[in-house]
Image (cartoon, rainbow, N blue to C red):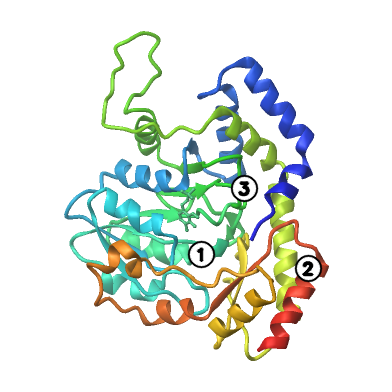
Amino acid sequence: MYDLIKHYNSNKKEINKTIEKILSKGVLEMGDEVYKFEDNFKKYCGAKYCLTVSSGSMGLLLALRALDIKVNDQVITVANSDIPTSHAITLVGADIKWIDVNEKTFNLNENLLEKNISKKTKVILPVHLFGNPANIEKIRLSSQKYNLKIVEDACLATGAEFENKKIGSFADITVFSTNPGKILDGIGPGGIVTTNNKVLFETLKKLRDYGRSSRPSKWPVKSELVGYNAKMSTINAAVLDLRLKYLEEYIAKRNQNAKLYQNILDSKKIKFQFVLPNCKSSWRNFSIRLKNRNKIYSQLYDKKIRIALGYLPINYKDAYYRKFNNKIRLRVTEKISSEIINLPCHQYMTEKEIVKISKKILALI
Ligand SMILES: Cc1ncc(COP(=O)(O)O)c(C=O)c1O
């Protein structure tokens, strides 16, 4: 789905120089480059505060910890996400309430939200699936009405826009992943957390660094709460900062690729993921829905076209959750999950490659 070698080669010299500089300086943890990147990223997405973390998964966990979510609390989310979305909720001991998604956008169906809110509900955790913004404004209205917090899973949606504004400042806390292969990616696992709330920011910083608020110049370490070692390496932050300069270009190219797919694959037999008006997806991949998905997927696979993720995970059907949730049924989530093929849409795809993939699909449907 991605080409990490082309990605590296596109600015190899800059990357190598940056890495060499940091290794020669020897500040590999919380170096100046980490703070510089955090500063640049918060400006990029218009948030007041930003901190880097060791992964998107860890960012979600820290977000729920910072909001003091725990046993007997409930978090509403979707089931069609990567498993870390649900794991973060389970890891803090809270209950998960999976609700169904909108068939067109594949995102949390905001019209089902309020009837699923109970006394236990504390947080709404929407996912901007494949980079496509969920209806965060409507979700925010419901959250205000019931005094709930919002944590956005924007792990696949760096640079995406809702009503012409970057994702990253709509929720109480927004979490991005910078794992290799993501929209803005580093050279190892990583994540970013943004918020407009200073208190949350201070708590998040402590949680990232063994629970302490400052780095000790001498022992003993003073931990103010129980935290983690969830820091991003200086080298990773520096490479992310370098790539941040090109992020708008990456997103523009991804949008151009998505348009090309839409033009070529225009057929009654294929459905696309719908982007809300005035929103911009960052197109982690281009998803199509087909009735006979499994057959087409295996035919493409047999033709050695390794283009497709043949599935969309359903968290409650995951090996762990299945044991407790075998009665849950979310009609739309299950339907679209059985129909989706994800096509590569990254910035290194050529027009020729997109045409080739699209023609193969058209010939099979
Ligand atoms: C929707 C979603 N949430 C969370 C994550 C977790 O991010 P990470 O891999 O950086 O831990 C992912 C990873 O792909 C994801 O796709």
Give the x, y percent position of residue 50. 50, 38
Residue shown at 69% from the left, 21% from the top:
21
Give the x, y percent position of residue 305. 69, 71
Query: Mark 1 or 3 closer to N-term?
Result: 1
Q: Nearer the viewer, mark 3 or mark 2?
A: 2
The residue lying toward the viewer, choosing from 301 and 217, is: 301
Note whether 240 is above or below 283 in the view shown.
Answer: above
Horizontal side, residue 254 vs residue 350: left or right: left
Disc 2 residue crowd, few under 14, some 14–19, many 20+, Cα 10 Å: few
The secondary structure type at the circle numbered 3 is loop
Disc 3: which residue: 184
The residue lying toward the viewer, choosing from 239 and 299, is: 299
Q: Disc 1 versus disc 3: distance between alpha carbons?
A: 16 Å
The residue lying toward the viewer, choosing from 160 and 263, is: 263
The residue lying toward the viewer, choosing from 10 and 92, is: 10
Q: Quadrant of residue 308?
A: bottom right
Disc 1 residue crowd, few under 14, some 14–19, many 20+, Cα 10 Å: many
Q: Quadrant of residue 206?
A: top left
Q: Disc 1 versus disc 2: distance between alpha carbons?
A: 24 Å
The secondary structure type at the circle numbered 1 is helix
Disc 2: which residue: 353
CB contact under 8 Å: marks 1 and 2? no
Horizontal side, residue 64 vs residue 259: left or right: left
Disc 1: which residue: 129
Q: Disc 3 versus disc 2: distance between alpha carbons?
A: 22 Å
Q: Is mark 2 within 8 Å of ligand 1?
A: no
Horizontal side, residue 24 vs residue 324: left or right: right
